[in-house]
Amino acid sequence: MKTRLKAAGIHFLLSLLIVSAVLCFFAFVWYSAPLFVLQDLHKVVITLVAVDIVLGPLLTLIVFNPQKKSIKFDLLVIGIIQISALSYGIYTSYISRPIYVVFCDGRFNSVTANEYAYLNLKKIPPDNPYLKLSVTGPLWLGAVKPDKLSKADEMDLDFATVLGDGLRVMPQYYVPYEKVKSDVIKASKPASSLDLSEEKLIERLKTSKKLEKGEPSLEQVRSLKRWLLKLNLPLEKIGLVTIKGRENYAIIAVDLGTAQVIDSVSIDPWWYQ
C-alpha cells in the first residue's frame, strides 16, 4: 500500500505542477484579468482538475503494482487519458481566447478567436494589422464609425447592431486605443460619484430585506470599496467602465486623466449605472 501511495503522490505532484503551469499561462497571457472569469474558463479548469489532478493519480493508486506484468500498459493508458484531457483544455482555450478588447458603444468588449473566424473579412485590406490574431494576449483598441458610409456598409453595421454586436465585430473600423481615449474618459463613471455608504444600505434593508431593481447588495458595495482602496489612488482620478465578455460583465478602472487601464474587478457594474 505504501508503494501505491508513493506512486500516486508523485503522480499527483507532477500533474499539479503541469496543470498549474498551464493555468498560469492562461491567467496571465491569453486570459489576463478579468477575462479569465468573463470568458467562463472555469469549465476548462474543472475538466483539467477533475481528469489530470484527481482522476489520473487516483487511477495510479488503484492499479499501481510493480509486480504486475501489465503495469506499463496501465500507466500508459492513464497517461493517454490525462494528455487527451490536457490537449482538449489547451485547444479549447486557444480557439476561444480573447484576441481583442475593443472599446465601442460606451464600454469595452472582448472579441474571441472563434468569433473572428466567422466575421466577414472580405472588405478589409490584406495589409490591415488587425487581421493577424494575437497569440500573446489580447490587444486593447477601439472601434469608430466613419462619418460617411456607403449604403451597403450602413446596412452591414445596422445588421450587426441588431444582433447585439455592432462595431465590436467589424475590424475594418478598428483604431489604436490612443484614438478613443477621450471617448473612454467620457464613458467612465467617476468613482467619486458613487454612493458607497454601507450605513444607508443597512438601514434600508432593515425596512425591507428585498433589494430594489438596480440596487447593490451589501457584499457588492463592500467588494467595490475594498477594490478601490487597493488601487491606492484618489477616487477623483478613477473612472469605472463596463467590460463585457462572453455573457458576463465586469468593471475596468481607468485613469480619468489619461484613460490608461489601471485594474479590473469581476463585479457586475449594472447596479451603479
Image (cartoon, helix red, strand yellow):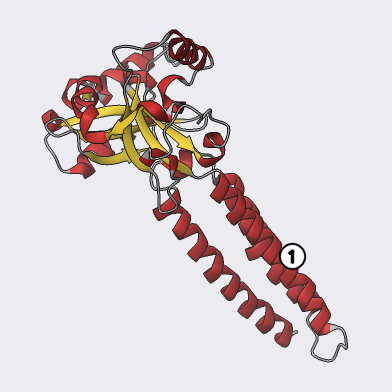
Which residue reaches farthest top?
Answer: 151
Horizontally, residue 139 falls left or right of residue 39, namely left
Identify the residue at horizontal 61%, vertical 49% (top origin). 92
Q: Position of residue 187 (x, y in %)?
A: 25, 20
Q: Amino acid at mark 1?
A: Ile
Residue 28, quarter of the rendered image: bottom left
Bin the neighbour count of mark 1 within 10 Å (Cα to Cα): few under 14, some 14-19, many 20 and up.
some
From where the camera sits, is residue 268 visible? no
Horizontally, residue 39 falls left or right of residue 181, namely right
Q: Nearer the viewer, residue 113 or 240?
A: 113
Which residue reaches farthest front?
Answer: 126
Horizontally, residue 178 falls left or right of residue 1, namely left
Q: Position of residue 145 (x, y in %)?
A: 33, 18
Horizontally, residue 61 falls left or right of residue 113, namely right
Count the labels in the image: 1
Using the image, determine if residue 267 lies above or below residue 79.
above
Q: Which residue is mark 1?
A: 81
Q: Position of residue 211 (x, y in %)?
A: 43, 15
Using the image, determine if residue 82 lies above or below residue 34.
below
